[in-house]
Amino acid sequence: MGASGIEFNTQRGELYTSYGYPAAAPFDGESLEQCQDYGVDDTLGGTDDQAIDCDMTGGSSGGPWFVGDGADGMQISVNSFGYTAQPNVMYGPYLGDVAQEVYEEAAAA
C-alpha cells in the first residue's frame, strides 16, 4: 500500500515529473526537489534513455519519474545520470521489454 504504479514501454516524449533529494551543491540533500519537462532522446551517448531539463545534482539518483504533472501518474523511470557536456539535464532509463521481464520475474519469486 502506498507504492506508485509502474509502467513499461511507454510512449516517449511525454511530460514527466521527477523527484529527488540532490545533495551536491547548491543543494544540501535535505529538501525534496522536482523537475518537469517533456522527455527527449539521448543524442550524446546513444543510449535508449530519455532526458529532461533538470538542475538536480548528485544524490538525486533513484528518484522517481512519473508521467504527467505530479506524482499521480505511473512511474516510468528514475533519475540516473547526466553528461558533463550537457549541464542541467537529467537522464532516466527507458523501461522497456527487458526491464518488464525482470520486474515480472522478481514479482513472481
Image (cartoon, rainbow, N blue to C red):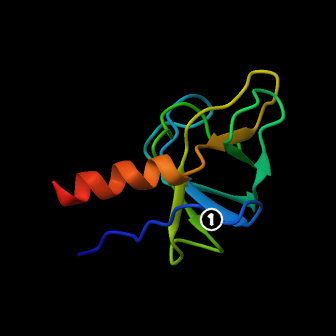
Q: Which residue is mark 1?
A: 10
Instruction: Between residue 73 and residue 60, name the one nearer to us.
Output: 73
Give coordinates of residue 20: x percent, y percent.
50, 49
Q: Looking at the picture, does residue 60 appear above or below residue 74?
A: above
Q: Position of residue 30 (x, y in %)?
A: 43, 44
Residue 7 position within the rendered picture, expressed as x and y whole percent measured from the top left: 50, 66
Quarter-wise, where is residue 35 in the image? bottom right
Residue 103, located in which quarter of the rendered image? bottom left
Q: Does 109 sit left or right of 48 as displayed?
A: left
Q: Nearer the viewer, residue 104 or 31?
A: 104
Q: Residue at x 62, y 65 (%)?
A: 10
Give the answer, above or below, for where 12 lies relative to 53: below
* Residue located 55% across and 28% down the image: 24
Describe the element under mark 1 as helix, strand or loop. loop
Residue occupying the point 29% across, 74% down? 2
Q: Amino acid at mark 1?
A: Thr
